[in-house]
Image (cartoon, rainbow, N blue to C red):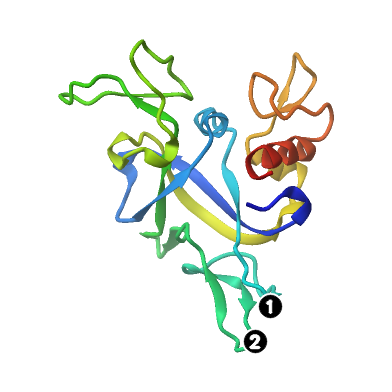
Amino acid sequence: MKSWDDNPYVWVVKFERIEKKQIAGEKLKPILFSTEMVQAILAGRKTETRRVINVEKGMEYRSKANSLTSDRVTAHFYDGYDHAYPKCPYGKPSCTVRDMLVPGTVLWVRETWALLSDDPYPTQYIYAATDQKTPGTKWQPSIFMPKEACRIFLRIKEISVRRLHDITPEAAQSEGVFWHEAAEGYTTDMDLRNFHGSDPVISFQKLWQSING
């Protein structure tokens, strides 16, 4: 965990939501999202996410470029021996070469979930982001969600390295922050969590602190 005040280096992962049938040979990797961020993805407000880079002590950051061309970032970290680190754990973007899609990585979203019935045929799942819990069900943490329960797939479009504090108002809104008309301010959900009256970056800062401390 890295707090806002630490201003860590972060992976900025931009993505687009796709249907399962659109997966075209990409590798699948899991990624966890909170319930409010799942709601933002489903609403089309969230199209990128920031994740902390665990930089080893003594490594130096040298910015050569901004985005990945493979699964290793071209804005490198060096350990004194010119070894480029680290490899992005979320995979790599898909790209188009001569009008052909070169497969990258599709993220399958783990979210808070529950098994609707003990009867396994057919298995039915419900999700905290969109469904009401029924009597006898118990919400399960996203980390334990099996792949077969996944309903949200995200194709990586771009990955870059930034400092956390580099986030712009526009990027904060791509992270799921939105303007709430009735409350006249920025927030991350309809319950006005992480509210701020004028600055989407501060709303995102509150979101980050709620997750990372």
Which circle marks residue 58 in the picture?
A: 1
Mark 1 burial class by Cα count in 10 Å: few <14, some 14-19, many 20+: few
Q: Please tell me in which quadrant of the rendered image residue 213 appears.
A: top right
Which circle marks residue 80 in the picture?
A: 2
Mark 2 burial class by Cα count in 10 Å: few <14, some 14-19, many 20+: few
Q: Is residue 110 above or below residue 135?
A: below
> Which residue, as the protein is rendered here, is positioned at the far top?
135
Q: Is residue 211 above or below residue 85?
A: above
Q: Which residue is depicted at the point 70% across and 58% down?
A: 8
Q: Which residue is depicted at the point 18% across and 21% down?
A: 119
Left/right of residue 203 with respect to residue 31 in the rendered view: right
Whether residues under marks 1 and 2 lie with C-beta atoms below 8 angstroms apart, the answer is yes
Q: Please tell me in which quadrant of the rendered image residue 43 appears.
A: top right
Q: Which residue is depicted at the point 74% across and 41% down?
A: 205
Q: Is residue 111 above or below residue 120?
A: below
Q: Tell which of 170 and 122 is nearer to you.
A: 122
**Residue 148 coordinates in the image, percent (x, y):** 28, 38
**Residue 15 coordinates in the image, percent (x, y):** 51, 47
Structural distance between the alpha carbons of marks 1 and 2: 8 Å
Q: Which residue is depicted at the point 74% across and 17% down?
A: 181
**Residue 95 coordinates in the image, percent (x, y):** 45, 60
Q: Tell which of 31 and 28 is nearer to you.
A: 31
Work out whether mark 1 precedes mark 2 in sequence or the reverse, and give the earlier one.
1
> Which residue, as the protein is rendered here, is positioned at the far left?
121
**Residue 3 coordinates in the image, percent (x, y):** 71, 50
Tag 2: residue type?
Gly
| Residue mark closest to the camera, 1 vs 2 | 1
Tag 1: residue type?
Gly
Badge 1 marks a residue whose secondary structure is: loop
Which circle marks residue 109 in the picture?
A: none
Q: Tell which of 28 and 102 is nearer to you.
A: 28
